[in-house]
Image (spheres, grey):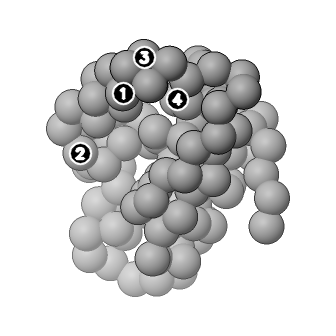
Amino acid sequence: MSDGAITQHGGGQYSAEGLRRYEWIFGEDFLSSGAVEIADKAARWFGLGADSRVLDVGSGLGGTAFLFAQTYGAAVTGLDVLPQMIAEARMRACIAAVATTS
């Protein structure tokens, strides 16, 4: 996990250390329990594929968006109210070689 965007915004729940703890518990790029399984189940239920476009509201670190894009080929736009989460998700998208736009 990168520390860039997150550490600039101080401590607390979404500090670099806080995010490491979440990911240790819930999995890389995810901030809540069952998120991987729920996202995968939703993708299959909706029949996501290469022609799908998804709006991920409250995208956090981008885990669901990455799963939909990498596993199902969907085009995903992530939104979050915290600028540091958007910056972190963009950084992770670059590392994962998932296309991003500003």
The answer for how far apart the CA atoms under marks 3 and 4 are is 12 Å
Give above or below for 21 relative to 86. Answer: above
Give above or below for 83 relative to 32. Answer: below
- Asked if disc 3 and disc 2 are in contact, CB closer than 8 Å, the reply is no
- The image position of residue 10, as x and y in percent, is 40, 83
- Discs 1/2, front: 1
The answer for how far apart the CA atoms under marks 3 and 1 are is 5 Å
- Asked if disc 4 and disc 1 are in contact, CB closer than 8 Å, the reply is no
The answer for how far apart the CA atoms under marks 1 and 2 are is 16 Å
Query: Which residue bears the numbered disc 4?
Result: 67
The answer for how far apart the CA atoms under marks 2 and 4 are is 15 Å
Q: Is mark 2 on a helix, strand or loop?
A: loop
- Horizontal arrangement in the rendering, residue 59 relative to residue 23 (left or right): right
Query: Which residue bears the numbered disc 1?
Result: 42
Mark 1 residue type = Ala
Q: Earlier in the sequence, mark 2 or mark 4?
A: 2
Question: Closer to the camera, 96 or 100?
Answer: 100
Q: Earlier in the sequence, mark 3 or mark 2?
A: 2
- Asked if disc 3 and disc 1 are in contact, CB closer than 8 Å, the reply is yes
- The image position of residue 79, as x and y in percent, is 53, 64
Query: Which residue bears the numbered disc 3?
Result: 44
Question: Closer to the camera, 77 or 33?
Answer: 77
Query: Alpha-carbon neighbours of circle 2 within 10 Å: few (<14), some, or many (≥20)?
Result: few
- Discs 3/4, front: 3
- Picture residue at 28% right of the left edge, 29% below the top: 38
The answer for how far apart the CA atoms under marks 4 and 1 are is 11 Å
Mark 3 residue type = Arg
Query: Which residue bears the numbered disc 2?
Result: 32
- Horizontal arrangement in the rendering, residue 97 relative to residue 82 (left or right): right
- The image position of residue 26, as x and y in percent, is 26, 36
